[in-house]
Image (cartoon, rainbow, N blue to C red):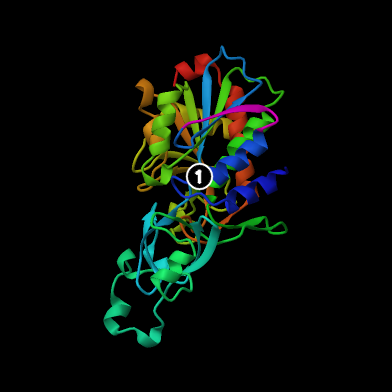
């Protein structure tokens, strides 16, 4: 499988929190020639490259497999569906978006309904958009018809946005770039490390349920005890709305290394090491301080008595929406940073973090 095809399959895979199976299967297929796998009951995937020796410091490369989405809450008498969110959304951007709802017969299409302006009162126009006044329409006219389609309470709901790539502009468009682009980077780094003889062993982790409270990584850190970790993320680009002096995650700006966000202060000496590595290797890098957001590093950094961690991000415009933009150039910068960092790490360096 070519790397672009890996990204396409990962982004098109349907895998909201708790239902990550399709994305996990794609990674298994890509890494099957050089790695062995374990899975736990949360669908956390552990990737053990066969080139590991087993007697060296262990570096974990982590990305999460789940995407933001929804779950069917109830079926209304008119056949439309009440739903709840899995992960955070801008509710104002949801109306008229196309979705896929899982049924025992396969996924069926629907749309998040919007009241035509002809029927909206001034109060409705001015009121906040909430999940209580949104619904999903699958074209049914009664609850019985919706049930006959196989729709059930608890069914996962996923954005319907097929992946596209404009090679001439190096522009990717699709859903789930948070964090399928990170998962693709982890898989590709593990593949490219073959024959490079780093001084550390590596384990790839494709973790579950990050978007609903970092739940999967808590199980991961109870099952393995890495000496250091790199989290690969899809990170919200700010270059279309922030003042120029505040832009820290620009499309085609390279890998974003995070100092902190609202949940974690990344290990400062490890951050400095990664930044120096990027500069010396000629890898495009942008450093960020975030006042919001969060990622698996927030749990990793204090787990098992403390684990050095950094976060490497692919800039993604319009993250946590149905229509994301990113570039292969920035994905490649993340891969190169991961490769160079792993190859430079030693047990002694890790101890000094």
Who's the residue at 67% across and 19% down the image? Answer: 197
- Expressed as whole percent of the image width and height from the top left, the position of residue 241 reads 45, 61
Residue 80, given in percent of the width and then of the height, sits at 40, 70
Position of 115 with respect to 53 (left or right) is left
130 to the left or right of 14: left
The outermost residue toward the left is 123
Q: Is residue 171 depicted above or below 66 in this figure?
A: below
Q: Residue 104 in the image: x percent, y percent?
A: 51, 55
For the C terminus, the quadrant is top left
Q: Quadrant of residue 106?
A: bottom right
Residue visible at 43% across and 76% down in the picture = 141
Verify whether residue 89 appears in magenta. no
Q: Is residue 255 visible?
A: no
* Count of marks, rendered view: 1
Q: Residues within 10 Å of mark 1 (few under 14, many from 20)?
A: many
Residue annotated with mark 1: 20
Q: Nearer the viewer, residue 173 or 46?
A: 46
User: Which of 139 and 48 lies nearest the eye of the viewer?
Assistant: 139
Horizontally, is 228 left or right of 190 in the view? left
* Residue 89 location (% of width, % of height): 40, 58
Verify whether residue 34 appears in magenta: yes
The extreme bottom residue here reads 118
Residue 39 position (above or below residue 15): above
**Looking at the image, which residue is at 48% across and 24% down?**
228
Q: Quarter holding the N terminus?
A: top right
Residue farthest toward the top in the current orientation of the protein: 55
Quick one: 286 or 29, which is closer to the camera? 29
Q: Please say whether residue 114 is visible from this viewpoint.
A: yes
Mark 1, secondary structure of its residue: loop
Magenta residue span: 32-40
């Amino acid at each position: 499988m070519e790397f672009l095809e890996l990204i396409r399959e990962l982004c098109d895979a349907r895998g909201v929190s708790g239902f990550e199976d399709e994305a996990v299967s794609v990674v298994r297929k890509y890494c099957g020639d050089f790695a062995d796998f374990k899975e736990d009951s949360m669908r956390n995937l552990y990737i053990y490259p066969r080139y590991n020796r087993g007697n060296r410091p262990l570096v974990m490369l982590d990305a999460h497999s789940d995407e933001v989405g929804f779950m069917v809450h109830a079926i209304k008498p008119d056949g439309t569906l009440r739903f709840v969110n899995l992960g955070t959304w801008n509710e104002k951007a949801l109306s008229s978006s196309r979705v896929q709802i899982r049924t025992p017969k396969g996924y069926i299409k629907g749309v998040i309904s919007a009241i035509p302006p002809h029927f909206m009162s001034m109060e409705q126009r001015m009121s906040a958009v909430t999940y209580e006044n949104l619904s999903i329409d699958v074209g049914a006219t009664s609850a019985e018809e919706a049930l006959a389609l196989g729709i059930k309470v608890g069914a996962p709901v996923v954005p319907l946005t097929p992946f596209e790539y404009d090679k001439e502009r190096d522009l990717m468009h699709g859903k789930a770039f948070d964090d399928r682009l990170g998962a693709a980077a982890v898989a590709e780094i593990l593949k490219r490390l073959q024959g490079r003889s780093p001084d550390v062993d590596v384990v790839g982790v494709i973790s579950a349920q990050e978007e609903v409270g970092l739940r999967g990584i808590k199980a991961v850190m109870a099952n393995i005890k890495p000496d250091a970790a790199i989290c690969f993320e899809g990170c919200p680009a700010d270059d279309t709305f922030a003042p120029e002096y505040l832009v820290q995650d620009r499309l085609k700006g390279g890998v974003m290394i995070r100092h902190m966000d609202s949940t974690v202060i990344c290990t400062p000496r490890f951050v400095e090491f990664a930044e120096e590595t990027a500069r010396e290797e000629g890898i495009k890098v942008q450093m960020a301080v975030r006042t919001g957001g969060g990622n698996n590093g927030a749990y990793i950094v204090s787990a098992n008595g403390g684990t050095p961690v950094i976060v490497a991000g692919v800039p993604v415009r319009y993250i946590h929406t149905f229509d994301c933009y990113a570039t292969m150039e920035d994905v490649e910068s993340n891969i190169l940073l991961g490769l160079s960092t792993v190859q430079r790490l030693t047990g002694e360096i890790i101890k000094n973090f």
